[in-house]
Amino acid sequence: MVIVGCGGFGREVWSIVEALNARGDSWTVEGFVDDAPSEESLNRVQILGSAVLGSVADLRKRKSPYAAVLAIGSPAARKDVAWALAGTDVEYPRLIHPDSTLGHSIEVADGVVVAPGARLSTNVLLGAHAHVDQNATVGHDSQIGAFSRLNPQACVSGSVRIGRGVLVGASATILQGLAVGDGAVVGAAACVVRDVPAGAVVKGVPAR
């Protein structure tokens, strides 16, 4: 497995893989891929006993099959990398931390990452490369679109429709039955009480 992105979330994904292996999985992380790693991130990757293998362009040249996790917080950047790797012999595993809860009829697409403490109720759909970060909750009958991300402690109520490439900030709440359009951003600690149009940025209580 290659982890794309060696920043904070990339190293959190490393920890998720370790937890899965402790449960009995058998992933080997070859290393990280990052176009512009900071010195701090390089040092922290080294402490893990790993290394940055190169850039996304280097990964595109790979001829042999490989697994990759797109551990990039920005939905737009994650989508760009997925497009860049299209046509390579890549598999996108689903990484679901053992200390998360998935109820009945949870549909999880390729590339999804679910962090520790996340709670998904029932009849939830997670689109490709969606991220549900630590202690976020998703209520019944909700949909999280491809490349979207729920930051830590985000609360998505029941029957919510979140489009593609949406970023929901830490501790934000989206009330029951609402829709958030493609590419929207919900600020940290916001409370969404009405539908959010595609591409909008909303924040505050109530979110505007």
Image: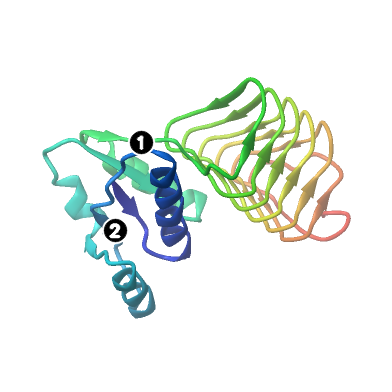
Tell me where residue 61 appears, x and y as whole percent. Answer: 13, 46
Residue beneath label 1, please? 92
Q: Quadrant of residue 79?
A: top left
* Label number found at residue 150: none
Q: Nearer the viewer, residue 30 or 169?
A: 30
Q: Vertical placement of 177 versus 115: above or below?
A: above
Residue beneath label 2, please? 32
User: Left or right: 55 with respect to 150?
Assistant: left
Q: Do the residues bearing badges 1 and 2 touch, measured as CB atoms within 8 Å? A: no
User: Left or right: 4 with respect to 107?
Assistant: left
Q: Vertical placement of 139 versus 57: above or below?
A: above
Residue at 56% across / 37% down in the picture? 164
Report if residue 138 is visible in the image.
Answer: yes
* Quadrant location, the N terminus: top left
Residue at 35% across / 48% down in the picture? 81
Tell me where residue 202 appears, x and y as whole percent. Answer: 75, 55
Tell me where residue 189 appears, x and y as whole percent. Answer: 77, 60
User: Left or right: 206 with respect to 46?
Assistant: right
The amino acid sitting under disc 2 is: Phe
* Quadrant location, the C terminus: bottom right
Give the mark nearer the N terminus: 1 vs 2: 2
Residue at 72% across / 31% down in the picture? 121
Between the residue at mark 1 and the residue at mark 2, the CA separation in whole angstroms equals: 15 Å
User: Left or right: 141 with respect to 94?
Assistant: right
Q: Nearer the viewer, residue 104 or 207?
A: 104
Secondary structure of residue under mark 2: strand
The amino acid sitting under disc 1 is: Tyr
